[in-house]
Amino acid sequence: MTGAAVQISHLSKRYSDFVAVDDVSLDVAPGEFVTLLGLSGSGKTTTLMAVAGFVELDAGRIAIDGRDIANLPPEKRDLGVVFQNYALFPHLNVFENVAFPLRMRKWARPAIAKAIGRVLEIVSLGHLATRRIAELSGGQQQRVALARALVFEPPVLLMDEPLGALDRSLRDQLQTEIKRIQRDLGVTVLYVTHDQEEALALSDRIAVMAEGKICQLATPDEIYENPASAFVAGFVGESNFIDVTMQGQNGPLATVAPAGIPGALFTATPSPAAQPAQAQAVMAIRPEALRLAALQDTPPCNAIPGRVALREFMGATVRLTIDTELGPMIVRDGRVSEAARFKAGDTVRLSWNERDALLFPPR
Ligand SMILES: Nc1ncnc2c1ncn2[C@@H]1O[C@H](COP(=O)(O)OP(=O)(O)OP(=O)(O)O)[C@@H](O)[C@H]1O
């Protein structure tokens, strides 16, 4: 099996007056894993359904390896699909469920048996071929759905929240398996989720969607480190947001005045989207970029006093909520870090590096 390229060009879909997908273009390379990530209603499913052939386009073009498929019915597109509502047949056993797409394609019996044997090994279900679907756990059922989507060796696999119904530990386990299978088989994957951790863990690239549009398309690292907007900074990972007024720019840095503390000035890094001429901006700082120290230390330039309101132990990390004149700020640091020593009620100094304070146009 080798993956195919997927080209989505200027895709639009409206439901009466409501624009569900608004001029979306996306090129997925052969063998690439691309995730559509967004809030509920942002147009992810509609985009994926359009590729699958279950949604008619109002405008745009969808091509697989350069071949336009917009006018083909779903079964002629030869795409593997794992949708939450694309259910298995509960009265049939695992083998018969996985055989279904092969029987539709009129495969010969020996070829069917061979392909199913192979795909059930890939998804670690070889020992359960004769088990009825109703007698499987949720995670096993999702593996059957994955096997059924992969068995005819499609060049492209479409997955819509395939792990949505599973608990956290099973999700983590299946996530790792999906990634391994995709790597081993070289299949191209277009994946939909609203879970940012899942998107960051699985994807080669993430398309962040909002209101029917792609607002950023980049690698997980790039999206996390250089979000294109305040929305992305808040949606992918956590961010502290501070409303500021721009005071001036000095090379790559800007001086800003926070709204909540008269007379205070900070330095920060304008993102490419921030307009130097714009008076108002929002400053975003990741919780792990904030440092905590005892209040009596000499204040550095980007620092504010605060009081620990809440300390949450998260396992590997500690998450502290600090009440400040700028409102509550979230700090996250390692379990054995200096920050982890503080407890609720302690007075502290919060500081940050200007490179970690990104400026965006107001939300
Ligand atoms: N058949 C339909 N008729 C009318 N409106 C629809 C239809 N299907 C989707 N919509 C609307 O289009 C918008 C985008 O829906 P879509 O399912 O693509 O979003 P999504 O990002 O996948 O959300 P979710 O994560 O909840 O599935 C939503 O506001 C939805 O209500």
Image: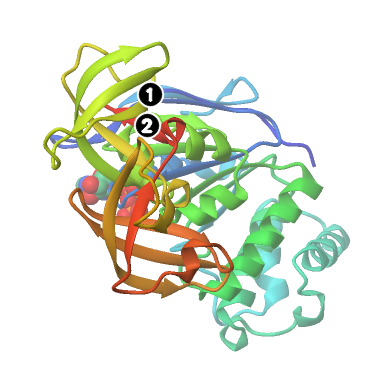
Q: Secondary structure at mark 1?
A: loop
Q: Is residue 335 visible?
A: yes
Taking the image as shown, residue 130 lies to the left or right of residue 218, namely right
Crowding at mark 2 (Cα within 10 Å: few <14, some 14-19, many 20+): many
Crowding at mark 1 (Cα within 10 Å: few <14, some 14-19, many 20+): many
Front residue (pair 356, 93): 356
Q: Are marks 2 and 1 in contact (CB under 8 Å)?
A: yes
Front residue (pair 288, 179): 288
Front residue (pair 18, 42): 42
Which residue lies at the image location 27% right of the left edge and 13% below the top edge? 276
Which residue lies at the image location 55% right of the left edge and 40% below the top edge? 220
Q: Secondary structure at mark 2?
A: strand
- Mark 2: amino acid: Leu
Which residue lies at the image location 53% right of the left edge and 73% below the top edge? 168
- Residue 131 horizontal/vertical position (percent): 70, 85
Residue 271 tag number: 1
- Mark 1: amino acid: Ser
- Residue 54 horizontal/vertical position (percent): 41, 45
Q: Is residue 123 above or below residue 357?
A: below
Residue 358 tag number: 2
